[in-house]
Image (spheres, rainbow, N blue to C red):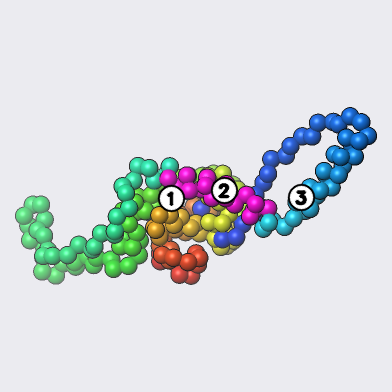
């Protein structure tokens, strides 16, 4: 599904700032300075180490977000096989002309590779991501990442986030419970497009291997 009218490696996880109460006495002040000195390596640590420290909590929150989005969807089921069998007559009983072009059932892509739950959830994810990006006046990679983070999509699941002309392109790895769902997006204000795609069944997410 496309939403046109109105989204891995990531940035650091932000930790809330905490105000320190004033400490009375020289001994307590010295202890406070020692404590600050002990914390400085963490403040100066690399983005990767800070994200790794917050990883488990973010992962739990991400999984819960996926569950909430898909709570109205059916349980996981194998993809439905393409329709087959004899051609059906129209409801009016008229026989189609002999030279009529018969539609070809898809043999690959989301239609046949996503299970029922992922197909349903993909529409909900497309809608919420596209709506959140429609009003983004300047869709830079940093701005798009913030919108996706605010929606609950963690940096570890955001891939190939980069500027392409006036748009920012990205992929979301939404694989869960053995599913293969991913999204491919182009954030460009009211020209934003978000489509479902199919990720590899196992292993790391690689945009080159996904099926559109």
Label 2 sits on a secondary structure element that is helix
Q: CA distance from mark 2 to mark 3?
A: 19 Å
- Percent across and percent down for residue 56 are 57, 50
Task: Give the mark nearer the N terminus: 1 vs 3.
Answer: 3
Label 3 sits on a secondary structure element that is helix
Work out which residue is located at the far left of the displayed protein and give it: 93
- Percent across and percent down for residue 161 are 57, 59
Q: Main secondary structure of the magenta part?
A: helix
Disc number at residue 126?
1
Q: For marks 1 and 3, give the one nearer the viewer.
A: 3
* Magenta span of residues: 50-67
Say if the magenta span includes residue 61. Answer: yes
The residue lying at 72 percent from left, 39 percent from top is 17
Bin the neighbour count of mark 3 within 10 Å (Cα to Cα): few under 14, some 14-19, many 20 and up: few
Label 1 sits on a secondary structure element that is helix
The N terminus, quarter of image: bottom left
Disc number at residue 43?
3
- Percent across and percent down for residue 87 are 12, 63
């Amino acid at each position: 599904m496309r939403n046109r009218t109105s989204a891995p490696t990531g940035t650091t996880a932000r930790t809330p700032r905490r105000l320190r109460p004033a400490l009375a006495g020289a001994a307590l002040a010295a202890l406070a300075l020692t404590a600050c000195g002990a914390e400085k390596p963490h403040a100066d640590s690399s983005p990767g180490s800070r994200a790794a420290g917050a990883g488990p909590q973010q992962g739990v929150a991400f999984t819960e977000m996926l569950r909430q989005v898909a709570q109205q969807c059916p349980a996981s089921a194998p993809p439905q096989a393409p329709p087959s069998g004899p051609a059906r007559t129209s409801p009016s009983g008229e026989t189609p002309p002999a030279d009529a072009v018969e539609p070809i059932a898809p043999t690959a892509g989301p239609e046949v590779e996503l299970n029922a739950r992922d197909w349903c959830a993909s529409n909900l994810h497309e809608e919420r991501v596209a709506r959140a990006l429609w009003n983004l006046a300047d869709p830079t990679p940093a701005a798009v990442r913030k919108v996706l983070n605010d929606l609950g999509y963690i940096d570890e699941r955001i891939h190939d986030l980069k500027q392409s002309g006036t748009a920012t392109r990205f992929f979301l790895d939404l694989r869960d419970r053995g599913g293969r769902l991913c999204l491919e997006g182009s954030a460009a204000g009211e020209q934003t497009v978000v489509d479902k795609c199919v990720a590899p069944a196992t292993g790391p997410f690689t945009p080159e291997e996904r099926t559109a």
